Image: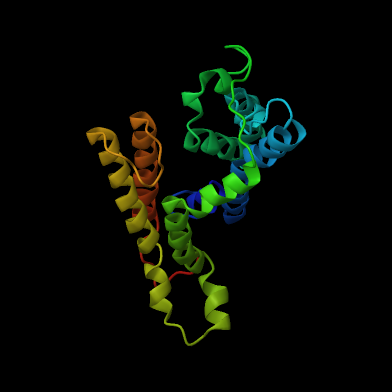
Amino acid sequence: MHAGCGPPLFRPPSRDLPLPGNVRAAAGGALALGALLPDLIDKPVGHILLAGSLDYGGLLAHDIFAVLILALPGFLQLHRRGSLTLLAVTAGVLLPQLLDAMWLFPANWLFPLLGPFTAEPVEDFLLVGLLRELTSPFEWLFLAASMPMLLALYREPFLRRFPFLPAPLFSLCPAIPAIALLAAGLYSVATALFSFGNTLTWVESSAYNLLFGLLLITIAIYLLRVWPSRREESF
């Protein structure tokens, strides 16, 4: 889910974000890569290499200082070369920290300022993690919402392979995930404001559900405004 937020955010029409297409494409891929890096680094290290001691999957790549360390050369790269690649990786690394509510674990998020890592070891992490993903309503919602977006992003290859499909249908595809994400975002905000259980996240923190809902609403509005129906254009 973390990586899925990346590429659409850097595939807007040129009139909305005046950057060359290759720059937007590279930034989108870098954002998706950055969103994967924290789990790709921390989960094997924490749950496999350190399984007998710490056994925690939110280590250094889930630390806010990882974002700050990447941000400085990212701004230098943007200033000197006009490239967004490293800044996009930085934004991607920040994304799972926000979605994983790392601020609820300040000693871990701000390590080493507040002391050592604090963690509760999880037995059979791989099995527990897999079951958690498979039973998460939001993961299924995000997967279902991603399919129309993929159709919109790769409209031309789909039309070449399946010429019998109506082309205008692909122009409507971005509206489907946008509406789904908007509904999920409004629901999450409501759970935060009125203090009832959020069945999408199963997180009790009102602050987390509020931030989560506002993030979904922002993405939904972005999709609805920046991805208008463009029957005459190709993606």
Q: Quadrant of residue 40?
A: top right
Q: Position of residue 159 (x, y in %)?
A: 52, 79
Residue 6 seen in this snapshot: no
Indicate whether 150 appears above or below 205: below
161 or 197, which lies in front?
A: 197
Left or right? Give the position of 187 relative to 233.
left
Q: Position of residue 134 (x, y in %)?
A: 52, 54
Left or right? Give the position of 139 relative to 183.
right
Instruction: Spot the residue most to the front.
Output: 123
Q: Residue at x 36, y 29 (%)?
A: 207
Query: How many numbered marks, from 0 up?
Result: 0
Q: Position of residue 149 (x, y in %)?
A: 46, 62
Left or right? Give the position of 15 relative to 153.
left
113 or 80, which lies in front?
A: 113
Instruction: Spot the residue most to the bottom.
Output: 164
Q: Residue at x 74, y 29 (%)?
A: 52
Q: How is the image coloured?
A: rainbow
Residue 43 seen in this snapshot: yes
Instruction: Spot the residue most to the right.
Output: 49
20 or 162, which lies in front?
A: 162
Q: Position of residue 121 (x, y in %)?
A: 62, 30
Indicate whether 30 appears above or below 232: above
Q: Quadrant of residue 180?
A: bottom left
Q: Residue at x 40, y 36 (%)?
A: 203
Left or right? Give the position of 104 relative to 111.
left
Indicate whether 51 appears above or below 186: above
